Image (spheres, grey):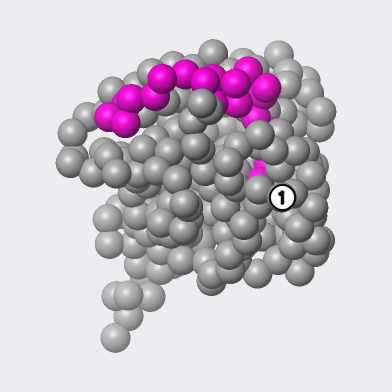
Amino acid sequence: MANAISAVILTRDSERLLPQVLGALARLDEVVLLDNGSQDKTFAIAKEFANVVVHEHPFIGFGKMKQLGTKLAKNDWILSIDSDEIASELLIDELLNLPLDPQILYEYDVHNFYRGKRIRCCGWGHDRFAGVYHRQYADFDSSAVHEKVIMRNGSRPQIHALKGHISHYPFENAESFLIKIKKYSTLYAKQNKDRKYSSPCKALLRSMWAFVRSYFLQQGFLCGYEGFVISAYNAQSVFWKYILLYEQQSTMLQP
């Protein structure tokens, strides 16, 4: 008998890849789609798949949204996957047929793409994510951004590597880089305003190092135009998150 798995996906205006994302998950028992304000065809696409259940909730940070999605699922086994990630057939086969241990987190390879090209430079080439877990033993932390799955008892998780992978298409073009910089920089500043010190000098130096690391040390120069743009994105992302953090901290100190 196949394992009962609930996939949990956060969406907002996710029509770009949603048909492929949901199509790859059609053999799972349930897909929980937790939406936070879509105005495009996201809902219409979701209705085309019999195993998809749609819920709506205002955005409260990625970690807390994924915690809520976990609670809304009908099954204890959860596959957390994004609306720009397409699961391979091998990954679905493993999830349905392998004997799963509730006290273990299961991870898979993430193949990252930009403009239709798989990117193996800029730190995108050896990406793995532990996104399969039993909700009685594990769940996401409450981080607003860069959230991860942790064990409920606080112990260090045991990780089992699956053979399947997901294909990740986070950015359609340079414009989508700019949109994500704004969103993630704002979330980072809010999350860290009481935790990390920032300054304009720190923002500049860290952004310069981010570009050097991505373009030279992580061999972005071998990926042509895509490697250059990704390296520039990494640098700009670091710059603006520390600038926004600095301004938030400066505002807190004002009388």
Position of residue 8 relative to residue 111, above or below, is below
Instruction: Judge whether residue 213 can be spotted in this image.
Output: no
Residue 250 lies, in percent from the top left, at 36, 70
Residue sitting at 81 percent across and 32 percent down? 115
Toward the viewer: 222 or 42?
42
* Whole-percent x, y for residue 165 in the image: 60, 22
* Front residue (pair 50, 143): 50
Report the residue at 29% width, 75% height from top.
Answer: 253
In the image, is 27 to the left or to the right of 153? right
In front here: 46 or 213?
46
Question: In terms of image quadrants, where is residue 199?
Answer: bottom left
- Tell me the kind of residue under disc 1: Ala
Q: What element carries label 1?
A: loop
* Residue 34 percent location from the top left of the image: 57, 59
**Furthest residue to the bottom?**
255
Q: Which portion, as a residue range, is magenta?
A: 83-104
In the image, residue 205 lies at what x, y percent?
46, 40
Is 96 rendered above or below residue 78?
above
| Residue at 40% across, 43% down | 76
Residue holding disc 1: 50
Quadrant, the C terminus: bottom left
> Is residue 213 depicted above or below 37 in this figure?
above
Q: In which quarter of the image is residue 17?
A: top right
In the picture provided, is 44 more to the left or to the right than 62?
right
Within-10-Å neighbours for mark 1: few <14, some 14–19, many 20+ = few
Classify residue 36 as left or right of residue 210: right
Q: Is residue 167 above or below residue 164?
A: below
